[in-house]
Image (cartoon, rainbow, N blue to C red):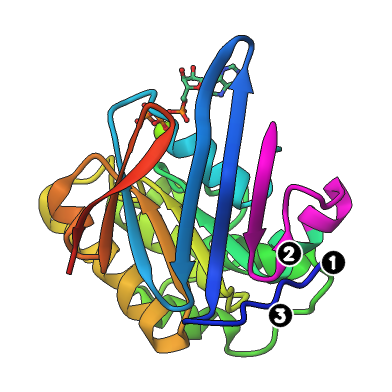
Amino acid sequence: MTCRTISTGPKLAVTCRALCRVFGERFVLRDLDLDVGEGRHVAVMGPSGSGKTTLLHILAGIVEPSSGEVVVAGLDVGGASARERAKHRQHKVAMVFQFGELLPELTVGENVTLPLRIRGDVPRAGDVERVLDAVGLTDSGAWPAQLSGGETQRVAVARALVTAPDVIFCDEPSGSLDRANSDQVVSLICDAARQTGATVVMSTHDRSVAEQLDEILVIEDGQLTPLEVR
Ligand SMILES: Nc1ncnc2c1ncn2[C@@H]1O[C@H](COP(=O)(O)OP(=O)(O)OP(=O)(O)O)[C@@H](O)[C@H]1O
Ligand SMILES: [Mg+2]
């Protein structure tokens, strides 16, 4: 893994320089720059098809950039091999998706500890209770099919927290929820991240969700511009 040292200013958890991603002939991301300081919570807004998911997947190491520099939690994501990116995902970053993406054949507790087991760790006593407690749930034996949309997202957040990641990428984590559940899930993510010092980058269509974070960026024509700094 390549470590990048920042000599001035706050330490950065995420850096993009001249990031491009092309699908066919189309530049979805074009010379995109991004700096996210450690512990900051940044919302990315933009219309459907503007490249929010593409950006988050590149940052999480799931999709490769076409060109440019991407550094996340110390890893040069663009220059890393698929194996290095997978290891980085297991140890440094986590993702929360719009519909939770729980595995239906595993219980809540098994879903939550999956990231630990994938990287070869044996879950410790109390791991499940600790992260379920952080999201206000108790029943580790429930099945995903028994959960409401809000509960499903809470489990997805618990699963993201279980490895104590440095950076949490959230792709419309409350996009399928009503106002009250949406606000709760986003608050849970932000509160949990503040407790551990984790950085959050979250895509959303919802201005009031975005306003719960520290900073709002808008993606347009493949580039990010600040909407508001609070
Ligand atoms: N694997 C792919 N192959 C070809 N085109 C793709 C691929 N992934 C994304 N795209 C295209 O890139 C563009 C951006 O897609 P993306 O999913 O990043 O948008 P988005 O901002 O997340 O949209 P939404 O708000 O609807 O989730 C779209 O035009 C999409 O069709
Ligand atoms: Mg998307």
**Do the CB atoms of the residues marked 1 and 2 lie less than 8 Å apart?**
yes
Residue to which mark 1 is pinned: 1
What's the amino acid at mark 3? Pro
- Secondary element at tag 3: loop
Residue found 63% across the figure and 75% down from its top: 163
* Picture residue at 67% right of the left edge, 63% below the top: 114
Label 1 secondary element: loop
Q: Residues within 10 Å of mark 1 (few under 14, many from 20)?
A: some
Query: Ligand 2 is located in which of the four quadrants?
Result: top left
Region in magenta:
66-86
According to the picture, the residue beneath numbered tag 2 turns out to be 75
What numbered label is drawn on residue 123? 3
217 lies above or below 215 = above
Disc 2 element: strand
Q: CA distance from mark 1 to mark 2?
A: 6 Å
Q: Return the x and y of residue 225 as percentages of the image width and height.
A: 31, 46
Is 22 on the left-hand or right-hand side of 188?
A: right
Q: Nearer the viewer, mark 2 or mark 3?
A: 2
Res 216 quadrant in image: bottom left
Q: Earlier in the sequence, mark 2 or mark 3?
A: 2
Q: What is the quadrant of the N terminus in the image? A: bottom right
Circle 3 Cα neighbour tier, 10 Å, few/some/many (<14 / 14–19 / ≥20) = some
> Which of the pair 135/69 is nearer the observer?
69
| Mark sitting earlier along the chain (3/1) | 1
Residue 103 seen in the current view: no
Return the x and y of residue 122 as percentages of the image width and height.
78, 79
Whole-angstrom CA distance, mark 3 to mark 1, is: 26 Å
Question: Horizontally, is 221 left or right of 73 in the view?
Answer: left
Amino acid type, label 1: Met
